[in-house]
Amino acid sequence: MKTYLDTPVRPDRNLSDEDTALAHALQINGRASFREIADALGVSDQTAARRWTRLRSAGKLRVLGLTDPARLGDSRWIVRVRCTPDAAVSLGEALARRTDTSWVGINSGGTEITCAVRTRGPGLEETLLLQKLPRTPQVVDVSAHCLLHIFFGRDLSAINKRGPLTAAQVKALTPRVAPVPVTDATPPVTLDDGDRHLLDLLARDGRASPGELATATGLSQSTVRRRITELRTSGVLYFDVEYHPDVLRERFRAALWLEVEPSRLAEAGAALAAHPEVSFAAAVTGTANLYAATDVTTAQVFYRYVTESVAALPGLRHVATAPVHRTVKGPGPYLPGRA
């Protein structure tokens, strides 16, 4: 079945300089008005709107309103499923259809599937991990690694490191209301049914207008605006840009599973997060306690990256790599048939 991520991309698979600037602007503030974007980029608001419509209609990118699991008392895990190659695609698509998964990828020649799994509370009870997957004949092994700390990649992407916008443009687009500081003692936010409905709509279209959201939820436009601001300020809601895998993705992608001395983990994670090759980096449970997603131009470049930049990380004990062959699902909902 055709999905958003399988939507054919036109021959100009990479974005133009102007389109990349727009994507960078949306990554900074997915709800920025076209006037705000236009002012920062030095174009008319009609031009900004036209570029966005073209990119979204072509299936190249979309803006998503996502929630931070930690602010809702949920946990996030990275799950590795070793399987027989003939089962990788069907298993990956089955995992992608679940509402508790994101970033489903087929790795290592089709012998491994990785995905992010979100669970209510700190444990993995009552999830697919302990029930369905181990009983599937084609599954060889399942391991789960809890995300302990994200060094880079919650509402940021590689374009934040390599994007074309200047510091002044970034400052102009940065949301004026920043999330309140959160500590380990900060209690999770409780949502009501209206919040959940609003968040479900934003997860599918992060740039839906207040009018559209008001019509769908039965709330007034002023209430929609106020609640979005409150959810952003509390740290629950953030906006991300989902790209078609052919857009802003280089030709060689791989996952890194690093074993680092515990006393150097924070230092190594911060250093890894600064690498331009890294699009996501987090401390996780398990022997390999530092995970990263990377993308570079070729396997040869990846070799130099691993033997030079990765090898220089403080406290590094062991490195394991897994090339990513296909992204079945990104950060947002799996939408079969999306054009």
Image: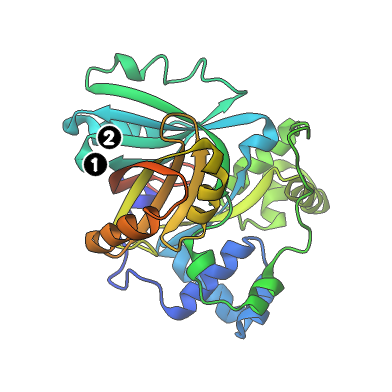
> Tag 1: Cα neighbours inside 10 Å, few (<14), some, or many (≥20)?
some
Q: Which mark is residue 112?
A: 2
Q: How many marks?
A: 2
Under circle 1, the secondary element is: helix
> Measuring 68% from the left and 76% from the top, which residue is drawn there?
35
Amino acid residing under circle 1: Ser
Q: Nearer the viewer, residue 329 or 334?
A: 329
Q: Is residue 257 left or right of residue 72?
A: left
Under circle 2, the secondary element is: strand
What is the quadrant of residue 97 in the picture? top left
Cα separation between marks 2 and 1:
6 Å
> Measuring 47% from the left and 75% from the top, which residue is drawn there?
19
> On the rendered image, what quadrant is the C terminus found in?
bottom left
Q: Nearer the viewer, residue 161 or 262?
A: 262
> Tag 2: Cα neighbours inside 10 Å, few (<14), some, or many (≥20)?
many
User: Can you say whether 42 is above or below 147 in the image?
Assistant: below
Q: Which mark is residue 108?
A: 1
User: Can you say whether 169 is above or below 149 in the image?
Assistant: below
User: Can you say whether 147 is above or below 327 in the image?
Assistant: above
